[in-house]
Image: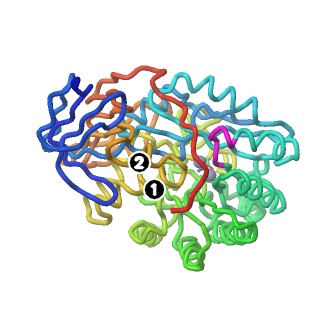
Amino acid sequence: MTAADCVVRNARIATATDLFTADIAIRDGRISALGTDLPRGEEEIDATGMLVLPGGIDSHCHFDQQRESGAGFTDDFETATTAAAFGGNTCVMGFVPQFKGHGIKDLVADYHERGRKALIDYSVHMYIADPSPAVVDDELPGLMRAGHRSLKIFMAYASSMISDYQILKVLTVAKENGGLVVVHAENNDMIRWMTERLEKEGKTSTACHALAKPAIVEREAVSRMIALAELADQPIQIFHVSSAEVVEVIRDAQARGVKVYAETCPQYLAFTAADLDGADGARYLCSPALRSASDQDALWQAIRANVIGVVSSDHAPFRIDDSSGKGGGTHGLPFSKIPNGMPGIETRLPYLFSEGVGKGRISLQQFVAVTATNPAKLFGLYPRKGSIAVGMDADLTIWNPSLTRRVAYANLHDRSGYSPFEGMTLTGWPIRTIVRGRTITAGDMREGAPGWGKFLPREAFSAF
Ligand code: URP
Ligand code: ZN
Ligand code: ZN
């Protein structure tokens, strides 16, 4: 028998359920054997003293995504997937937005053209801003069968949000085509009313963003969304859960057997509304808004209890020096005019490992589950992706659990020009990222090239 293409030696392998030591043989991009004293491979990688993890799957990232107005997301496929790989990820999921009055099919095709620059594998959520019969009946079924199995909807933002009736239409087409519906759940009218009140009082600083979007805004929308999903009998995932009260709503629904899944993001674990105050407040402006220390505790608890099953980055890069982007904050732009979101595609795994596993808040297995295995299962990539076993894609992250580094934007690879995590000291960093057997990043070196990343068509949703 010919030698394996590569053998990763003495790997301390962590999956969502196990921790064991073995060599990993890779052939034709897949794991061909796990065992001890495996025959030499064409390439040998020594992982002694390191953890080897399933490559991170970041199921919520914005890049190469068109926006109707205002500053755009600054990363394209190449910069986003480069940053993702340096952050230990082997797969990202981006978004194709539909614009009201238009279809989505051509935009999906255009996104795949742009995807030719990907260094790591990618998949796609389609976001539906106008579920007209032409889109729902003629475009979506074929696109979903072609592997674009998730539909994103907004309950806030006038240009993107849809009505409850339209949400039911989207839930229906998802149900008919094996899709999952992912939701930005905030009540638009409550935000509008709060923002108008604050603006009348001259309260327009970035700190007021959190006042305009208290947790009840999120709780109302999540509660309503769950009711709609129950009525339509369609699974949903609530994006970027930020607060204790929303965790409670989701926990209750899950206990009733409703198929509602939840995601949070490092920013909701790391920062509070206090970070919105001051000259740098725009850097921390995202939606839902940042909350309090007790909300952070509730989110960690919900991850431990598997109420929240996914931690994604919601990477939303806007240039810090663009006055219509995050730079607007330093030019006195009212909070309501500053684009929402923050970068984090490269810091997601190091932050969660350091603050979660390192500080005993979650186990190593829980870390693997919420960053790789659960997103793979939820989004129809498992068992091809999301764990380490014979036959699976050789998507591996070699992880130095005791490497301590301070986060500095100068060492990161996205294009936003800043990191909200700047200056944080984190222990546990990826040192090599391997996608389908090929090393994409090793240390500070990018070894992969645009074009290696492939579109991953996804299977129909099946509950897990
Ligand atoms: O504020 C956020 N989260 N911005 C990114 C886009 C979105 O709503 O997920
Ligand atoms: Zn959102
Ligand atoms: Zn997002």
Foreground residue among 277 and 194 = 194
Classify residue 55 as left or right of residue 63.
left
Q: Secondary structure at mark 1?
A: helix
How far across and how far down the image is residue 451, in percent? 48, 21
Question: Callout 2, which amino acid?
Answer: Gly
Would you name the residue on which mark 1 appears?
374
Q: Residues within 10 Å of mark 1 (few under 14, many from 20)?
A: many
Would you name the residue on which mark 2 appears?
386
Magenta residues, as a range?
144-150
Q: Secondary structure at mark 2?
A: loop
How far across and how far down the image is residue 265, in percent? 48, 55
Q: Residues within 10 Å of mark 2 (few under 14, many from 20)?
A: many
Above/below status of 325 relative to 445: below
**Which residue is located at x 49 percent, y 25 percent?**
78
Classify residue 265 as left or right of residue 13.
right
How far across and how far down the image is residue 217, in percent? 67, 67
**Which residue is located at x 47 percent, y 61 percent?**
309
